[in-house]
């Protein structure tokens, strides 16, 4: 079965699972899902605090005396520390609320967690498959390009060889074009002294 079909079936199963439960339990499960997302993304508060601290620090350094850069660093560090504390607090509260909901409806939470884990696994496998297909297509394109380059090089080599043969044939005189050499006349021997 294709991964896309499995992903669609898992999503349909999740929808059916959520619609089959009582309204109060569905509200708890929706809250559980939202708290899970909040808990996983608490680090965004730290990043936002660091960015705001950096911007404030740079603005304070540019607006005030240049010699006060160390004093401007103190509020920036406090803002970063406040961001870290806020993120940890948010994560702690979200985890406590998730635990309370999980205790109230353990079967539903376990089933939802299993469905979500399967869905995440299938989506990762689909991404890996798509990436492999892209890599395969790129490799095939590179191979085709290399083959075209090799064919062009062979064609050029054949053209050069044919051109050289033509030039050689054009330069090489035929027996009809070869002028006859005059017959050599014998050279009389020179008298030698005795």
Image (spheres, grey):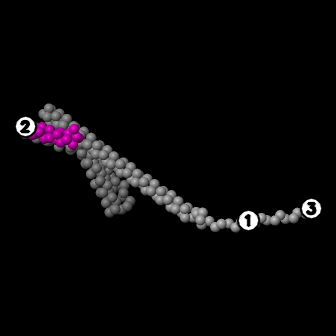
Range shown magenta: 1-19
Mark 3 neighbour class, 10 Å CA radius: few under 14, some 14 to 19, many 20 or more: few
Tag 2 residue = 22
Spatial CA span between label 3 and label 1: 29 Å
Could you say whether the residue bearing mark 1 is in a helix, strand or loop?
A: loop
| Residue 78 visible here | no
Spatial CA span between label 3 and label 2: 143 Å
Tag 1 residue = 184
State yes or no: residue 7 in magenta. yes
The residue at the point 55 percent across, 64 percent down is 170
Callout in the foreground (1, 2): 1
The residue at the point 59 percent across, 65 percent down is 176
Could you say whether the residue bearing mark 3 is in a helix, strand or loop?
A: loop
Considering the whole magenta stretch, tell me its main secondary structure: helix
Q: Seen in the image, is 23 located left or right of residue 147?
A: left
Q: Position of residue 69 (x, y in %)?
A: 36, 57
Tag 3 residue = 194
């Amino acid at each position: 079965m294709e991964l896309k079909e499995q992903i669609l079936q898992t999503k349909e199963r999740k929808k059916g699972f959520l619609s089959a439960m009582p309204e109060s339990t569905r509200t708890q499960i929706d809250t559980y899902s939202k708290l899970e997302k909040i808990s996983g993304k608490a680090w965004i508060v730290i990043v936002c605090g660091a960015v705001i601290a950096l911007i404030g620090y740079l603005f304070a350094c540019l607006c005030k005396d240049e010699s006060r850069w160390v004093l401007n660093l103190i509020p920036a560090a406090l803002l970063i520390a406040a961001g870290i504390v806020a993120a940890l607090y948010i994560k702690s509260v979200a985890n406590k609320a998730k635990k309370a909901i999980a205790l109230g409806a353990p079967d539903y939470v376990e089933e939802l967690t299993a469905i979500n884990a399967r869905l995440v696994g299938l989506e990762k496998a689909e991404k890996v498959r798509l990436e492999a297909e892209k890599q395969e297509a790129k490799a095939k394109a590179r191979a085709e390009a290399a083959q075209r380059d090799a064919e062009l090089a062979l064609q050029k080599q054949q053209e050069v060889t044919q051109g050289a043969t033509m030039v050689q044939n054009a330069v090489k005189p035929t027996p009809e074009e070869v002028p006859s050499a005059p017959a050599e006349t014998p050279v009389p021997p020179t008298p030698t002294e005795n």
